[in-house]
Image (tube, rainbow, N blue to C red):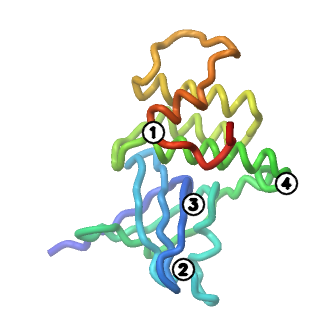
Amino acid sequence: MSIKSYQTEGIIIRRYNQGDRDKTVTVFTRERGKITAIAKGARKINSRRGGHLELFNKVKLTIYQGKGLDTITGAVSIDCFPCLRLEPNITQLAYYVCEITEGLLAEKQKHPEIFSQLIKVLGNCTVDSSREYSIFLCQTLGFLPQKNYPSSFNVHSFIENLLERRLKTLSS
């Protein structure tokens, strides 16, 4: 029987607490696409992984592939995009970009071009770049045809219709 673990680099696009000690995170990687995994004990005070598993962080992960949810056994931050945490409106745009990425992508389907674009947007998060990313994401996934869209096109409402729910960020 072989050990089913692997290493990958990715961006934390969603995280939530699981019980008293654990975190469940969604990571978007270049090689494996969107992965949801649990980090057992990551909320404990003396956890070595906990601080690395925050939203917007680019991390190098060691993951054990289990029968159900994968388990994160190691995490090291590569980049934490500090500019995203300086201004509340920039942080809100970064949340929006991560929320639509998490909502529109299917599990374990790789999209290296979307990953590269996400890195660029998080490195320079503005209203224009987040709108361009939203359109790029929808076009790459086949939800929108490849053409230029006027500034009057409401991509936010379009994505809400695709997801069949209201987005938590950027309330209209």
Separation (CA) of disc 4 from disc 3: 20 Å
Q: How far across and how far down the image is residue 113, in percent?
A: 49, 32
Q: How far across and how far down the image is residue 154, in percent?
A: 62, 23
Residues marked 3 and 1 touching at CB (< 8 Å): no
Separation (CA) of disc 3 from disc 1: 27 Å
Q: What element carries label 1?
A: helix
- What residue is shown at x 68% (from left), y 36% (from top)? 172
Q: Which of marks 4 and 3 is nearer the N terminus?
A: 3
Reading the image, the residue beneath label 4 is 86
Figure label count: 4
Reading the image, the residue beneath label 2 is 42
Q: What residue type is labelled 2?
A: Ala
Q: Which of the two discs, 3 and 2, sits closer to the camera?
A: 2
Q: Which amino acid does label 4 sit on?
A: Leu
**Quadrant, the N terminus:** bottom left
What is the crowding at mark 4: few (fewer than 14 residues within 10 Å), some, or many (at least 20)? few
Reading the image, the residue beneath label 3 is 59
Q: Earlier in the sequence, mark 2 or mark 4?
A: 2
Separation (CA) of disc 3 from disc 2: 15 Å
Reading the image, the residue beneath label 1 is 163
What is the crowding at mark 1: few (fewer than 14 residues within 10 Å), some, or many (at least 20)? few
Q: Which of marks 4 and 1 is nearer the N terminus?
A: 4
- What residue is shown at x 54% (from left), y 64% (from top)? 15
Q: Which amino acid does label 3 sit on?
A: Val
Q: Which of the two discs, 4 and 3, sits closer to the camera?
A: 4
Separation (CA) of disc 2 from disc 1: 30 Å
Q: Which of the two discs, 3 and 1, sits closer to the camera?
A: 1
